[in-house]
Image: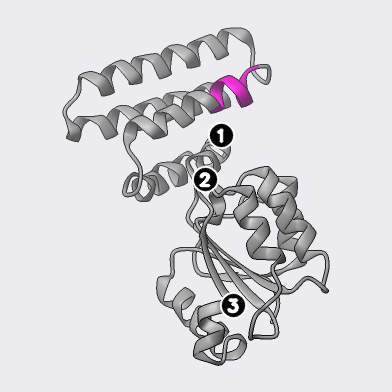
Amino acid sequence: MHHLILYGTDISLRDKILRELKTTSLKTPDALKFDLSSLDGHGLAFNDLKAALLTAPAVAERRVVLISRAEKLDDRNLELIDHVVSDPAKPCIIVLEAATWDRRSALRKGIAEKVKVTGGKEKKSAFDLLYDLPRDRAGVLAALQGLLEDDAVENILGAVRWWWVHKVKGTVPAAKYKKGLLVIQEADERIKLSSLLAKEPALEVALVKLSLLLTA
């Protein structure tokens, strides 16, 4: 069994693959009890991950380390995972469950090239959408609705602000950059003063205005 990145929003497919993994790799109740570690990638302590990945199996041939929300893993943990998947002698199988797997990160790209990657439709993050904004405004606005099912308008606008300051600044003329900041500020004010139903249109208008600035 190979290390695995299991990404996307198809829960039934993910459950099926995990059942098969347990059947083939953890064949007894003792193996399930002693040689399966389930971790949460959000805020995962490095020492906890290290212990799970480097501890020898008690019953099974190899331990299975299942990491949910793997898109939240920090670089230090990703470096350890990259080290383990690069060494076939390490005593574990790593399964990374992730809503998205951003291959713009050199670490994530490197891990994906060394393991089996499978899953359903990948859920894009706010940052994925923003990178697509200059090329596919309509697609971004359509995908935004799915993003809003899991995250607040305020958080997404925060991602927009970060992206504009850290990724757009220096790539457009200063006048356009300042106009973009004003667009984001205006959206922030409208969102703070709006009812729940009026917040989403304020965000959509801001994204349209920013895309026009980037393509004009």
The answer to whether residue 152 is seen in the rendering is yes
Sequence-first disc among 1 and 2: 2
Front residue of 206/4: it is 4
Residue 135 falls in which quadrant of the image?
A: top right
Q: CA distance from mark 2 to mark 3?
A: 22 Å
The quadrant holding residue 191 is top left
* Most foreground residue, 14 or 198: 14
Q: Earlier in the sequence, mark 2 or mark 3?
A: 3
Check disc 1 and report the residue beneath it: 134
Which type of secondary structure does the marked residue at label 1 adopt? loop
- 54 vs 177: above or below: below
Give the amino acid type for the residue marked by disc 1 in the picture. Answer: Pro
Tell me which secondary structure the magenta stretch mostly adopts.
helix
Q: Tell me which segment is drawn in magenta.
A: 163-169
* Tag 2–tag 3 contact (CB < 8 Å): no
- Marks 1 and 2 sit apart, C-alpha to C-alpha, by 33 Å
Marks 1/2 in contact by CB < 8 Å: the verdict is: no
The residue tagged 3 is 35
Judge depth for marks 3 and 1 and give the one in front: 3
Identify the residue at horizontal 69%, vertical 68% (top origin). 55
Left or right: residue 152 versus residue 89 is left
Q: Is residue 35 left or right of residue 104?
A: left
The CA distance from mark 3 to mark 1 is 47 Å
* Mark 2, residue position: 43
Depth check, front residue: 33 or 160: 33
164 inside magenta stretch: yes
Question: Residue 51 in magenta?
Answer: no
Q: Is residue 94 left or right of residue 143?
A: right
Three-letter code, disc 3:
Asp
